[in-house]
Image (tube, rainbow, N blue to C red):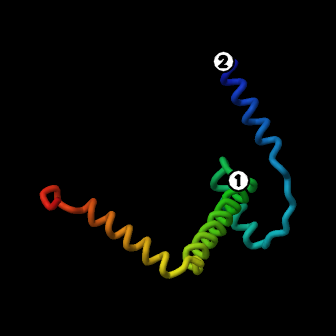
Amino acid sequence: MSAILGARVRRNAAIRHRPKIAATVDPLLLKVVDAWLRKHPAFDRSKVIDEALRLWYARLQQKAMEEQFTSPSGVDAGEWEAWRKIRDAAASQRLRAPNDA
């Protein structure tokens, strides 16, 4: 029983230590959020904001990865060609039938 109580106390302490923020929001968006919350009483504005921030951060990470993979690497073309040859030789060796060896 004490383990369950301890877990609840730790969880509640973590919730209480969340930073509070103040933000100015679009009144129409707030009406939509409040209407949704009336139909979903297990949620509150904080949970909606948490989800919005998670989605924003995921989009930010996605954009960063897209930029990373589409920007020039700065690696010399000759070095890329050397790695391609190594990769192709390794793939060819692994894909060869057992009696081709």
Quarter of the figure that contains the N terminus:
top right
Please identify the quarter of the rendering in which residue 11 is found.
top right
Instruction: Kindly state the secondary structure of the residue where label 2 is placed.
Output: loop
- Kindly identify the residue that appears in the image at 59 percent across and 78 percent down: 74
Quarter of the figure that contains the C terminus:
bottom left
Q: Position of residue 9 (x, y in %)?
A: 75, 30
Q: How far apart are marks 2 and 1 (CA)?
A: 29 Å
Q: How many labels does the image show?
A: 2
Q: Where is residue 31 in the image (x, y as percent from the top left)?
A: 74, 67
Residue labelled with disc 2: 1
Along the line of sight, which residue is nearer the eye, 41 or 73? 73
Along the line of sight, which residue is nearer the eye, 16 or 64? 64
Instruction: Kindly state the secondary structure of the residue where label 1 is placed.
Output: helix
21, above or below 12, in the image = below
55, above or below 20, in the image = below
Along the line of sight, which residue is nearer the eye, 51 or 74? 74
Q: In the shown orientation, is residue 85 left or right of residue 12?
A: left
Residue labelled with disc 1: 47
- Kindly identify the residue that appears in the image at 72 percent across and 25 percent down: 6
40, above or below 69, in the image = above
Mark 2 residue type? Met
- Kindly identify the residue that appears in the image at 48 percent across and 80 percent down: 78
Mark 1 residue type? Lys
Please identify the quarter of the rendering in which residue 53 is found.
bottom right
Q: Where is residue 10 in the image (x, y as percent from the top left)?
A: 74, 32
- In this view, the residue farthest toward the top is 1
Q: In the shown orientation, is residue 90 left or right of residue 27?
A: left
Please identify the quarter of the rendering in which residue 60 is found.
bottom right
Along the line of sight, which residue is nearer the eye, 80 or 65? 80
Q: Estimate how packed mark 1 is, as few (under 14), some (14 to 19) or many (20 or more) residues with alpha carbons within 10 Å.
A: few
In the rendered structure, which disc, 2 or 1, sits on the residue that comes first in sequence? Answer: 2
Q: Position of residue 77 (x, y in %)?
A: 50, 81
